[in-house]
Image (cartoon, grey):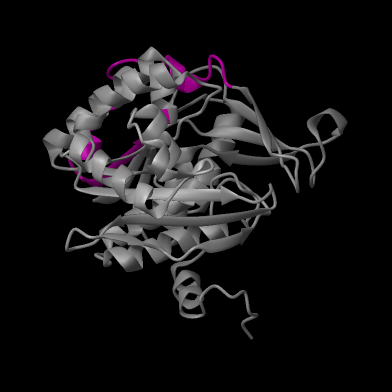
């Protein structure tokens, strides 16, 4: 039995050392990342039994990617070895007033060659508690979208919960196309973990101007947004929304909210974050939410775990949160103060 299975594209990440710009780089640091892979790596590190489904080319780059996942305890037995290339993305890390930026080189990557029958979803999902994917996967190609929808349907028939993060990427598609596709997927979703902006712009939930302070929602606006979302999609058993306020590329404020066991909207504390590597922080947050659901945590405690995992990811190089369950428990007891443990 797998507690969480995810499906998506994992890519080779190439980053200039430190905070160099791509145009000045003479070497690149290597890592691997992709939203769905980042979630199961983080979960595996904290004791959750996970498996990752994708397509990877049958070459040394594909082998290295599989080894990366295995290193952190993620099951790779359902990865299909097929296709000619591994997707690549180049990350230029921002600092201060200079934002991070990404250049994709993922056209014709292995996952886009997926065909019906490549993945035995029934076999996988009959022994899965939660199936997770994102809007990034839905945006890749029609082939991948067809397979994702098949996985969602199979998960529902098998009794597995479907968890989803909208995870909109403007370099992959437009808001209108994302709305068309994701609106079609939403009836299958049980657990939605995403952020305020993606709910408003992708799911087209309009908010009156009185609910904004500048570009940010007020506390009253956040409650109205949450209520509108739950009214629109009554099939959702759990909704968790994140909110980020960027003071600069190096300093952010992050918090989240959900409904508690009595139906009241509850908020996490606001965490001030020092950014070393922002990529994958939202995925660490999703991992924290799924961990909380699987372990039966109360909503307020789940939010603190998830927001702390998100905050901690900002301090870890690479796309994935590398942390143990004991470290999370200890840090929460100390309120994540960063005090040295001796």
Q: Nearer the viewer, residue 320 or 333?
A: 333
From the top left corner, tell me how far across and down residue 314 is, in percent. 60, 55
Q: Quadrant of residue 145?
A: top left
Residue 305 horizontal side relative to residue 100, left or right: left
At a point 28% along the width and 63% down the height, the residue shown is: 299
Above or below 262: residue 246 = above
From the top left corner, tell me how far across and down residue 37 is, in percent. 46, 41
Q: Quadrant of residue 214?
A: top right
Tally of numbered tags: 0
Q: Quadrant of the image for the C terminus?
A: bottom right
Above or below 255: residue 233 = above
Q: Is residue 267 magenta?
A: no
At a point 72% along the width and 42% down the height, the residue shown is: 94
Residue 80 in sight from this viewpoint: no
Magenta segment, which residues?
A: 106-135
Q: Is residue 134 magenta?
A: yes
Residue 147 horizontal side relative to residue 279, left or right: left
Q: Nearer the viewer, residue 310 or 116?
A: 310
At a point 34% along the width and 63% down the height, the residue shown is: 302
Instruction: Farthest residue to the bottom: give it.
Output: 342
Residue 302 horizontal side relative to residue 18, left or right: left
Residue 129 horizontal side relative to residue 75, left or right: left
From the top left corner, tell me how far across and down residue 45 is, in percent. 46, 59
Q: Nearer the viewer, residue 161 or 29?
A: 161
From the top left corner, tell me how far across and down residue 149 is, in percent. 26, 24
Residue 258 in sight from this viewpoint: yes
Q: Nearer the viewer, residue 189 or 95?
A: 95
């Amino acid at each position: 039995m797998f507690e969480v299975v995810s499906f998506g594209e994992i890519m080779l990440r190439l980053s200039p050392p430190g905070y160099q710009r791509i145009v000045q780089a003479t070497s690149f640091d290597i890592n691997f990342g992709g939203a769905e892979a980042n979630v199961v790596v983080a979960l595996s590190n904290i004791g959750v039994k996970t498996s990752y489904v994708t397509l990877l080319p049958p070459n040394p780059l594909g082998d290295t990617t599989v080894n990366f996942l295995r290193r952190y305890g993620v099951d790779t037995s359902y990865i299909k070895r097929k296709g000619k290339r591994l997707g690549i993305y180049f990350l230029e890390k921002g600092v201060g007033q200079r934002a991070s930026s990404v250049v994709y080189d993922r056209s014709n990557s292995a996952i886009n060659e997926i065909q019906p029958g490549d993945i035995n979803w029934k076999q996988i999902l009959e022994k899965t508690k939660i199936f997770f994917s994102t809007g990034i996967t839905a945006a890749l190609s029609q082939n991948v979208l067809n397979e994702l929808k098949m996985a969602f349907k199979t998960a529902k028939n098998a009794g597995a919960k479907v968890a989803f993060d909208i995870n909109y990427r403007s370099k992959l598609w437009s808001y209108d196309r994302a709305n068309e596709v994701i609106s079609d997927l939403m009836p299958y979703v049980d657990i939605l973990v995403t952020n305020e902006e993606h709910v408003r712009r992708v799911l087209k939930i309009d908010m009156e101007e009185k609910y904004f302070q500048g570009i940010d929602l007020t506390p009253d606006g956040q409650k109205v947004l949450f209520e509108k979302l739950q009214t629109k999609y009554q099939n959702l058993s759990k909704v968790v929304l994140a909110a980020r306020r960027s003071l600069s590329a190096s300093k952010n404020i992050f918090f989240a909210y959900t409904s508690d066991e009595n139906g009241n909207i509850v908020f996490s504390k606001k965490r001030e974050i020092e950014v070393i590597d922002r990529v994958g922080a939202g995925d660490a947050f999703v991992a924290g939410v799924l961990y909380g659901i699987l372990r039966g945590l109360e909503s307020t405690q789940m939010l603190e775990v998830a927001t702390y995992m998100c905050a901690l990811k900002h301090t870890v190089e690479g796309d994935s949160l590398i942390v143990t369950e004991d470290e999370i428990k200890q840090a929460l007891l100390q309120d994540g103060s960063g005090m040295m443990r001796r």
